[in-house]
Image (cartoon, helix red, strand yellow):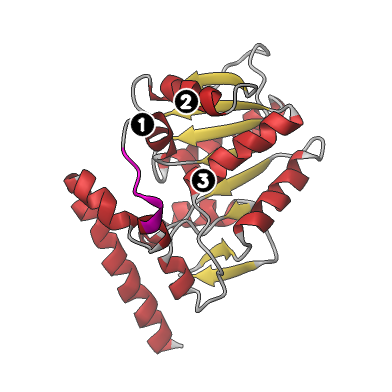
Amino acid sequence: MKENVTNILGVKISTLTYSDTLELIFKWLSEKGVFKTIVTPNPEFLVRAQKDMEFKRILNSADLAIPDGSKLIWASKGKVLERVSGTDLMISLCGVCVKSGFTVGLIGGGEEIAEKTAECLLKKFPKLKIGIATANCDWPRNDTVRVDVLFVALGMVKQERWIYNNREKLKDSGVRLAMGVGGAFDYISGAVPRAPKFMRDAGLEWLFRLLVQPWRLKRQLALLEFVTMVMRGRKEE
């Protein structure tokens, strides 16, 4: 992605709005023989990328890096206009696939979470075609599985590395788009409650996650580390 991006802590982040992001992805899916990847950076991603150069390289190799965190708007000095939630984008893309006749695939999540996610998506989109839904990360070595859009929920770093390492295999299998979606399966399946919309809009989803999952405290400290890194970078400009 060479335009409509800004640089935050050395990682290229899309400045497209939510609607423009969907429009771009729809354009990609309309093209034959393409294979695109999407990553969903938030402050935790960017902090990790400062300590893991391979992860940073993988993030920057993606065709689209959506700003999945309200703090990225602040960090970009307003170049990022709005947060593009990975979970919301996944749901919207399922709607696009229904209208266009594309098949989706779900890989990752906890035990039976992918299958439960598929059930919930089918309730919302009865005509959605789902080619695979499994926690098994071994991509099928046959032609029985047909997937156009693949959602991978293996958690930060692992899912991006899996997509990157399997990109040629996925492309040869006919996959047009692969996206790491983190905890999206948990939210969609109902395994983990999602923050109310007003909290998401206010940039307080992190607080809701912490209340629901106190064990995330150590991970949430990355937000403070992120702010410190950005402020330090501004002083050095």
Q: Which residue is mark 3?
A: 88
Q: Please report contact status of discs 3 and 2: CB closer than 8 Å, yes or no.
A: no
C-alpha span from label 3 to label 2: 14 Å
Which stretch did the figure color magenta? 193-198
State left or right for residue 196 relative to residue 134.
left
Count of labels in the image: 3
Q: Which residue is mark 2?
A: 120
Q: Which residue is drawn at the image coordinates 60% and 66% (left, top)?
A: 15
Q: Upstream in the sequence, badge 3 or badge 1?
A: 3
Q: Which residue is mark 1?
A: 190
- The amino acid at mark 1 is Gly
- The amino acid at mark 3 is Asp
Classify mark 3: residues with Cα within 10 Å, few (<14), some (14-19) or many (20+).
few
Secondary structure beneath label 3: helix
Secondary structure beneath label 1: loop
Principal secondary structure, stretch drawn in magenta: loop
Q: Please report contact status of discs 3 and 1: CB closer than 8 Å, yes or no.
A: no
Residue 151 place in picture, x, y as percent: 54, 34
State left or right for residue 151 relative to residue 43.
right
Secondary structure beneath label 2: helix
Q: Please report contact status of discs 1 and 2: CB closer than 8 Å, yes or no.
A: yes
Q: Which residue is drawn at the image coordinates 23% and 51% (left, top)?
A: 210
- The amino acid at mark 2 is Cys
Q: In the picture, residue 179 is in which quadrant?
A: top right
C-alpha span from label 1 to label 2: 9 Å
**Residue 155 forms part of the magenta stretch:** no
